[in-house]
Amino acid sequence: MFMKWPNYIWSWFRSLFYNQPKPYDTVHVEELPDRLRERTVYLVGEGKHLWVAAMTCPCGCNETIQLNLLAGRRPKWSVSEMPNYTVSLHPSVWRKSGCKSHFFFRNSEVIWCNDHPSGDASHAA
Ligand SMILES: [Zn+2]
């Protein structure tokens, strides 16, 4: 029992620093701006009618990720906005080009998938 303490403390620290970062800001816009702020998810549309979600790639490569929300076009993502103003996207985002980042976006937080090439980013929930 006693020997397990260091592990326990370490995972507690990890959850504190890695798994609970500051959530992304959510911004509703009618047109996507030329430059996106970091750690911000843009929901492009009019009122409740959204067609694109966009953000800068969370890996730091600075590429803009645009996710189609319109039915009838593929690939298509769905977005859920919670009463506490957090946003979730479904399914996961997997860039086929560039940095090949693969992550989930849940409750306005990025959750990296284990197959991300950067080793320290592999603490998926
Ligand atoms: Zn990237």
Image (spheres, rainbow, N blue to C red):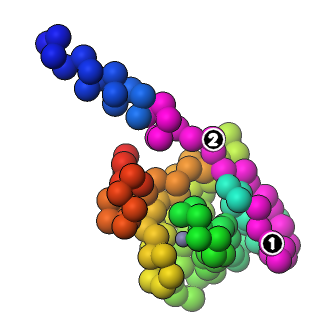
Q: Is there any visible trace of residue 25 in the rendered image? A: yes
Kindly identify which numbered label has been placed on residue 35: 1
Q: Which residue appears at 67% of the width and 55% of the height?
A: 39
Label 2 neighbourhood size at 10 Å, few (<14), some (14-19), many (20+)? Answer: few
Q: Which residue is mark 2?
A: 22
Label 2 sits on what residue type?
Answer: Lys
Pick whichever of labels 2 and 1 is earlier in the sequence.
Answer: 2
Q: Nearer the viewer, residue 23 or 63?
A: 63
Element type where label 1 sits in the image = loop
Tell me which corner region of the image, top left, top right, bottom left or bottom right, holds residue 67: bottom right
Tell me which corner region of the image, top left, top right, bottom left or bottom right, holds residue 14: top left
How far is mark 2 from mark 1, CA to CA? 21 Å
Element type where label 2 sits in the image = loop
Label 1 neighbourhood size at 10 Å, few (<14), some (14-19), many (20+)? Answer: few
Name the chief secondary structure element in magenta: loop
Q: Position of residue 37 (x, y in %)?
A: 76, 61
| Residue 122 is one of the magenta-drawn residues | no
Q: Which residue appears at 59% of the width and 71% of the height?
A: 61
Tell me which corner region of the image, top left, top right, bottom left or bottom right, holds residue 53: bottom right
Q: Position of residue 23 (x, y in %)?
A: 63, 45
Kindly identify which numbered label has been placed on residue 88: none
Q: Which residues are magenta?
A: 15-37
